[in-house]
Amino acid sequence: AALLAYPLLIEPTLDLNAQSRWWGIIYVAFAVALTTCALMARFWRRAPEPAEVTDTEADSEQPAAAPESGSAAETPAETGSDSSTTVEARAESRAPDGIDWRRRLVWIALAALPSSLNLGVTTHITTDIAPVPLLWVIPLSLYLITYIAAFASTRRTAPAWAIDLAAALAIPTLIVDALGIGGELPRMMLVLFFLTLTAYAAHSLLAADRPPARRLTEFFLLTSAGGALGALLNGLIAPALFNSVAEYPLAVALVALLPLAAGDRSRLARLVGSTLWLRLLLFGLAGVGVLLVAAGDTDDDRVLLLAMILVCLPVIALMRRPWPFAAIAMVIGLFVGVVRPGLGAELQERTFFGSYNIVDRDGRRTLSHGTTRHGSQLQDPAQRRRPLDYYDPAGPAGDIFNVVGGAPRLAVVGLGTGALAGYGREGQRMDFYEIDPEIIEIARDPKWFSYLSDCPCQIGTRAGDGRLALERAPDGGYGLILLDAFSSDAIPTHLMTREAIRTYARKLAPGGVIAFHVSNRVFDLDPMVAATAKASGLHAMSAEIGSRPSPQGLPSSWVVVARDPAVLERLKKGKHAWSPPAQGGPVWTDAYSPLWGVVRPGVFSDLG
């Protein structure tokens, strides 16, 4: 409830200073309550539990006990009892306290898997399916709900249906998601359902195996360590090992191992391995995979993935244990997460800020991060200086540079491929501010993109946060400051606040303008930029085109801000309809910038 309340109630109502104060007050109250509980546990401790009886002590005491019936020499065979059952009963009664390192490692693994999958799903759906920043609330809420549901149960057995179904859906989820089957919303629902099912199965296994109360401190410490390990795998280890976002498909593949944690009691493996018609069907599909490979259609990575899956299916048909199924899932996960992203890519790099691909297709070289395109360039030497996509000269960007882009010094926050350098003129200087040094290396290397090297103007590149770097620039130096930095599919909020706009205004030369690239299918940022600019004593004008301005262009939306409204009026001489943005938008500050108030209506229905 607290998690969902933050973006919906707390963030729109309180600024960061008020949130900090209230958080401090509540945390002090929590610390006092926790200290009180500790003191109560220390001074009002219950009577100690009876000492445990070992197997040796129990065996030595048993002959001395007076038998209730028959002679003292009665043996298990004579009484019809089964000694193995007695041993098993003792082992079961002793199991909760029999905590060895194997059991501890299982606890850690069962906590790490859903934690890693939760983070992987969040990154996947907000990068590769629908770049909606607020979506992180949904998978985290589902993850927490499964934990609550699992530990609310007093059962000592995990639901076999959840374990089997989660393992069975591992490969189909990889296939549907990797092949892009269905629309964005159905794929997102599948991924979220798989996360919920897996998290519930893993958390149920943890809850069923929890020890007695006196060992719960160790148990929850280890499960917390497992959750932290899952986060470390995604946040630190995977970026160092892989050039792609491989942790998500690998976590999906590892779900196939859940039946092993349940004691290898998977009904799925036995069902497939013992049903003749299922085995015949899988062998038939494998034959289709062989034909696809023989036909030579494996240039398409989707066809190759499908063929590989079909060829591997007979192994599933022959199995009676989960290991072969899990092994196939891991092979597919490695292909989807590690091999496939690099197929057809000229360059694949991963940094702290994201995973980038450079792909050549139809005479155009494109730099992308997930589903977000960060720029492209035509490979024809006669046209390679032409800016493409959102920056096409036939779009609003062309109006900005043609009308107000003739100043001697220009600043651009966000580099991408350097496409805006295509507007550079002789005698100008363009300073690009880019937070990711790897992007600077890519853009400056003519082997990949030549916008910077082909520009007749003087080019400067500076690594670091654009707002902080601009604060160190001389006041009054730039005739145009253009904000083109994107995180996922939106401009970082700290670049669009009242304090940020006032910083940019100080760096403007007389008659200068600030341009915001606000193209976004999730957020309607025009009214917010206009209201925030007005609160800073500035005026705003915007233009948006919902269709391609040319075969090389993409729909885009821009907002231009200036001190002098007469400067903005000049934009009306351009090709597009420039007008004041809608009124009534929120004013963002460094302490108050809620995203919920700028979400476009019907955004989730558009994902279908």
Image (cartoon, helix red, strand yellow):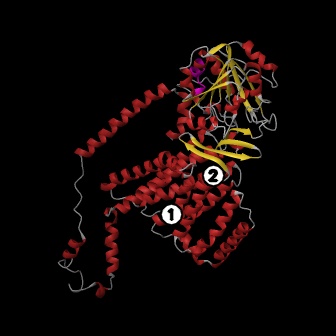
Residue type indicated by callout 2 = Gly
Q: Which residues are magenta?
A: 494-502
Q: Main secondary structure of the magenta part?
A: helix
Q: Report the front residue among 51 and 566.
A: 566
Residue type indicated by callout 1 = Leu
- Which mark is drawn over residue 342? 2
Is 440 one of the magenta-colored residues? no
Q: Are marks 2 and 1 in contact (CB under 8 Å)?
A: no
Residue for badge 1: 257
Image quadrant of residue 606?
A: top right
Q: Is residue 391 above or below residue 362?
A: above
Q: Is residue 167 something that shows in the picture?
A: yes
> Which structural element holds mark 2?
helix
Whole-number angstrom distance, CA of label 2 to CA of label 1: 27 Å
Relative side of 499 to 366, left or right: left
Q: Is residue 154 something that shows in the picture?
A: no
Is 495 one of the magenta-colored residues? yes
Image quadrant of residue 287?
A: bottom right
Residue at 51 percent of width and 69 percent of height: 323
Across and down, in percent, residue 393 comes to 78, 29
Q: Report the front residue among 557 and 48.
A: 557
Relative side of 277 to 544, left or right: left
Q: Is residue 556 above or below residue 472?
A: below
Q: Report the front residue among 549 and 42.
A: 549
Between marks 2 and 1 in the image, the one whose residue lies nearer the viewer: 2
Across and down, in percent, residue 305 comes to 66, 60
Q: Is residue 378 above or below residue 21?
A: below
Across and down, in percent, residue 491 comes to 62, 32
Label 1 CA crowd tier, 10 Å (few <14, some 14–19, many 20+): many
Residue at 56 percent of width and 48 percent of height: 243
Q: Which is nearer the N-term, disc 2 or disc 1? A: 1
